[in-house]
Amino acid sequence: MSEKTMGRLAQDMKREVIGIVSHLKDPRLEGGLLTVTRLDITSDLDVAKVYVSVLGRPEGPKAALDALNHSAGHVRTEVSRKMHIRKAPRFIFYEDDSAAYAEHINQVIRELHQNDPPAPESAE
């Protein structure tokens, strides 16, 4: 498949995964914000890596990722049914920590600006 077609397929599949994950009734997924940020498919359509951002959970994203990986077979069946494809890829859910990393970078930049000496006044 062409790269353009693979990108379109990944976006359509991401949309379907978001809908399916939002209706899962696992207590480990309750509370907090769960967002599917990216979906990457291998060229042979065998594996799809789903990157998920989990915010607002005091125990962290581990329990939510375990629940998602446990229900990966159900997600695969539903994606196959909704997209009318014969063979859906195997889904593997990963933590996407890009939001936490961006916040860390912003904090470092703020600290650097706090430590800067004030700019000298230009006398004109």
Image (cartoon, grey):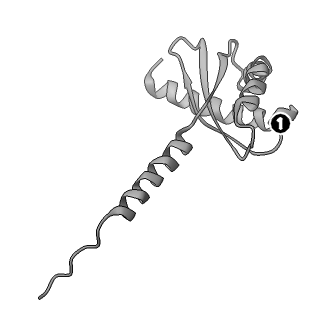
Q: Is residue 24 visible?
A: no
The C terminus appears in which quarter of the rendering?
A: bottom left
Question: Taking 109 as reference, is 97 left or right?
Answer: right
Is 57 situated above or below 122? Answer: above
Q: Given the image, on which type of amino acid does mark 1 rest? A: His
Tag 1, which secondary structure?
A: loop
Residue under numbered circle 1:
23
Q: Position of residue 54 (x, y in %)?
A: 68, 40
Q: Quadrant of residue 73?
A: top right
Nearest to the observer: residue 109 or residue 75: 109
Label count reads 1
Q: Position of residue 103 (x, y in %)?
A: 52, 50
Q: Residue at image x 74%, y 43%?
A: 57
Q: Position of residue 29 (x, y in %)?
A: 80, 36
Q: Residue at image x 29%, y 73%?
A: 118
Question: Taking 3 as reference, is 19 left or right?
Answer: right
Question: Taking 108 as reference, is 15 left or right?
Answer: right
Nearest to the observer: residue 99 or residue 105: 105
Is 18 situated above or below 4? Answer: below
Is 117 situated above or below 22? Answer: below
| Farthest bottom residue in view | 124
Nearest to the observer: residue 16 or residue 98: 98
Nearest to the observer: residue 117 or residue 8: 117
Q: Quadrant of residue 10?
A: top right
Q: Position of residue 48 (x, y in %)?
A: 60, 20
Disc 1 residue crowd, few under 14, some 14–19, many 20+, Cα 10 Å: few
Q: Residue at image x 51%, y 24%?
A: 6
Q: Is residue 107 visible?
A: yes
Q: Quadrant of residue 122?
A: bottom left
